[in-house]
Amino acid sequence: MGKTYKYDEEMHVPFWLPAASLYVPADTPRHKGAIIAVKKRIKTGRFRHIDQNHCIIFTLKLLVHLSVTIMDYFKEPVSGDKVRTIGNHTFTWTDQHIPKSQTDPLRFECDELGAAAVKKIQSIHEQLRSEGHQVNRGDLFETLSQYHDQDDDLSQLWQETHHVPEWVDWEQIARGQRFFYRYALANLIGFAFQGFVGENSASTSVVEVLARTGGFSTRVLRRRLLETFQLVLQVTHSLEYIKPGGSGHRSIIRVRLLHSMVRQQILKVAASKCRFFDQDTHGIPINILDSIHAIATFSCNHAWLQLPCMGITPDPQEVEDYIALWRYVAHVIGSPQEYYTSAAQAKAVMESLAYNELFVTPTSVVIGHNFVEALKDLPPINISDGFIQAASRQLNGHEICDQLGMGRPGLYAYACFTGHCWMVSVLAMMQQWIPSFDERMIQLCREGLHGAIIHSNQGLGGEGEEWADGGDVVVL
């Protein structure tokens, strides 16, 4: 007789079903095991004390298992010695993927032009203060815009960020912007619980920078997340926003200057405190590898790590368009853009960095917990911690969530997340079938998210469209 175990210990049958004498073979699939257990309980009369609510919850759990089984069944088989797995994503390592030996040197490179520009701006501020003028130290972009024609470094940065590369197709960029709002309800969940909770919490370089800029505070972290959301919303709003001189374009330059200033501050403190930041391990703070990883996360994770887990398969052209948008963002923010010339190449970069760089540390556990606390009840969705845990586990896998110390939610939370997946997948199908409905949903999500995240008191407090320079670091 084969190895056996109690069903409700290993298969997670609700605790109110008595376990006595009910065993299921260890190799039995989850959904079949559930049916066997129910039949045995009915046959032995042990099912009589279960009320209607228990039956409904058990049915929802069974539907969750069936959904996972169906999704696994239709996944493309992957075989061979070069198979790699990141959470729930399995892929084959190819020649397009980048080994760690080639990405590690990028830790010790940074945005030299941005760093030089920040030094020039700071010297201009010092001169203005010595002349009795009031200066806002955080308003780096305004100083750049006023003095870029009076200094070589500032002029070079201004010209670089305002130059439009030949490969930019504004119609394609506009289509890429629509991609974000077309699947907005799914993208937000994936963005928060796979991109932030999973990717950033387990990325050691990001975690170390957050820890040294006050990132442990839930209140501060919540605002940083909102500011990052604001940047994404401005980048994806319209062509007017992303073209040179637009609100989104200015915000990208502000983030570039901010990152250079934060890097300067961390290195200054590290020079006097040798243990403040381990450059031998993590490289330069906010380095080139970090920026490549961030752009890959923002441009690729929706299409391959998030939406498919919610039952949505984007059109390949949509993915190409969205990656083209973020390739342009990479150009403006000072990150190498040659890694995103095609969707296939960008996907390989995303998989390479996710596989090479994700590593959970004790600091990751603390920041992972604070991510959950910061996202809990965050407008406009106002979701519970149970839903956050269920979504994080479904999108990232149990292994990384266990390493981050994330709790195991109950049946109801998983049922709610499954309901969300069904809703967004049905919406996606309807938008594909009805173009007018698609247009209306894109417009509704664009206006609703801008109002909730940027202008509402529950969001950034109605501070307007301009991104605030006063923060420490944006999670990008």
Image (cartoon, rainbow, N blue to C red):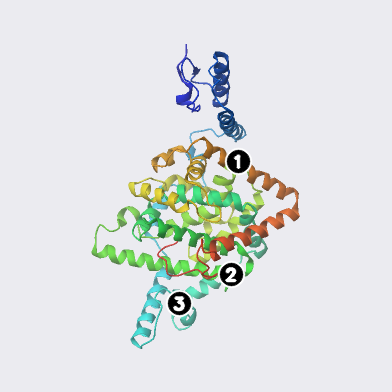
Relative image position of residue 282 (x, y in whole percent): 34, 54
Q: Quadrant of residue 220?
A: bottom left
Residue lying at 66% horizontally and 52% vertically, measured from the top left: 317
Disc on the earlier residue, 2 or 1 = 2
Relative image position of residue 393 (x, y in whole percent): 48, 40
Pointer 1: residues within 10 angstroms few (<14), some, or many (20+)? some
Q: Inspect this view and state whether residue 167 appears.
A: no
Q: Amino acid at mark 1?
A: Gly
- In the displayed structure, 374 sits above or below 65; it is below
Relative image position of residue 95 (x, y in whole percent): 51, 45
Q: Amino acid at mark 3?
A: Leu
Image-based side of 39 in relation to 123, left or right: right
Q: Secondary structure at mark 3?
A: helix
Residue corresponding to mark 3: 154
Q: CA distance from mark 2 to mark 1?
A: 43 Å
Say which of 314 and 436 sits in front.
436
Residue corresponding to mark 1: 419
Residue corresponding to mark 2: 164
Say which of 16 and 331 sits in front.
16
